[in-house]
Image: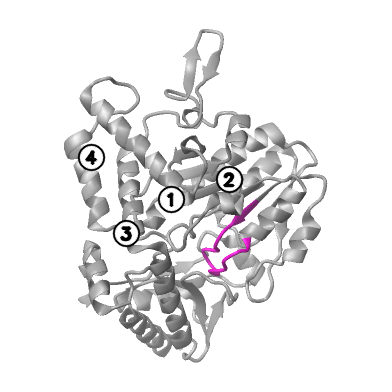
Amino acid sequence: MSNSWQSKVRSDFPILSTKVYNRPLVYFDNAATTQKPKQVIQAITDYYEKENCNIHRGVHYLSVKATEAYEDTRSVIRDFIHARHSHEIIFTRGTTESINLVADSFGKKFLSEGDEVIISVMEHHSNFVPWQQMCLERKATLRFIPLLEDGSLDIPGFCELITEKTRLVALTHISNVLGTINPVKEIIAVAHQHGIPVLIDGAQAVAHSAVDVQELDADFYCFSGHKMYAPMGIGVLYGKEHWLEELPPYQMGGEMIRDVYFTHTTFNELPFKFEAGTPNVEGAMGLHAAIRYLREIGMDRIEACEQELLDYATRHLLGIGGLKIFGTAPHKASLISFLLDTIHPYDAGMIIDKMGVAVRTGHHCAMPLMEYLKIPGTIRASFAFYNTKEEVDRLVEAVEKAKEMLL
């Protein structure tokens, strides 16, 4: 990345000029949420200043303008992930609600006692607990794809889990702890050979590389706006048309109805069947702006930049004695989870923070994975294209300081 291009990009993010503890902020918590460029912030301001109105429910000027902008965002998302139809794009509050929608609707219609659902041991709680609870409710069995030593999925082990009782596979595209990029296309192909649908948690993927849901052949693909430079509280569920037609509504209320009578209700067509209530229009405007921003930079450029940062950070962190990285798969996204000797991650994290470097510590909403790895948690540094090698040097300095103080 050239210095001039990097300076331009960083100037788009106002928060990056913040100082913490009298030091310039180094923000390495991008896997939790990304910072927002001024283009996204301005899009939200413009909506409230010029178009604020509820959508789909009015014929006056503001309602029509807001509705057009909202539905245009749906079309932009369709193009961004290469879906076939705009009505396959369902707006949600985020990845968590998207997965809960499928778990609830799919589970109630298609899961029975004795059936099985396959997930992996690396799943975020958002793609773990909904399936766990639905299986408990339906008296089905939850089965887990094991890991190899480097944090890759055991693909032969996955194939052995498939039986005539398997009803669905739910899997993260990229692990939020290990950084492993899972071979989801291969896994989907194997599942489809057995007639099994697949849900992909794409929360950690869509901001880092191009996603084509038709090429993957995913039945469901879920992601959140706030992890891709858009506002919090907006997300997407992509679902193949025939599956969305099959599933019953998740929530009841306005907009998702066609007709309501005293004795019964008929439901709306896609995508509105799954979008009950007043939507997050400002979030959609911000998501539209974020996608436009990512496209202007280019997903290939973003992926290359972040890979360069990952390689640089991995090399320099491994130069610290006693530091162990968890997740060394050959195909990784731009995050590093590590522990430092016998130091508890919270203790190290506090010192790293005082050095002006924001990292995440703990179990990262993946407690079963921590149990599987037999560790209390990790320190996680996650990178975005606006980060720099100089900031990585600051991280290394902070980790060395934590080691000096705590050992």
Residue holding disc 2: 220
Q: Which mark is residue 47?
A: 4
Q: Residue at image x 62%, y 36%? A: 243
The crowd level at tag 3 (other Cα within 10 Å; few <14, some 14-19, many 20+) is few
User: For numbered disc 3, what is the local secondary structure?
Assistant: helix
The crowd level at tag 1 (other Cα within 10 Å; few <14, some 14-19, many 20+) is some
Label pair 3/2, CB-CB below 8 angstroms: no
The answer to whether 406 appears left or right of 195 in the picture is left
- For the magenta stretch, what is the residue range? 170-183
- Quadrant position of the N terminus in the picture: bottom left
The answer to whether 48 appears left or right of 322 in the picture is left
Disc 4 or disc 1, which is closer to the eye? 1
Q: CA distance from mark 1 to mark 3?
A: 12 Å
Disc 1 or disc 2, which is closer to the eye? 1
Res 64 → quadrant: top left
Picture layout, residue 263 above or below residue 331:
above
Q: Nearer the viewer, residue 140 or 9?
A: 9
Residue type of the residue flagged with mark 3: Glu
Q: Nearer the viewer, residue 379 or 325?
A: 325
The answer to whether 345 appears left or right of 42 in the picture is right
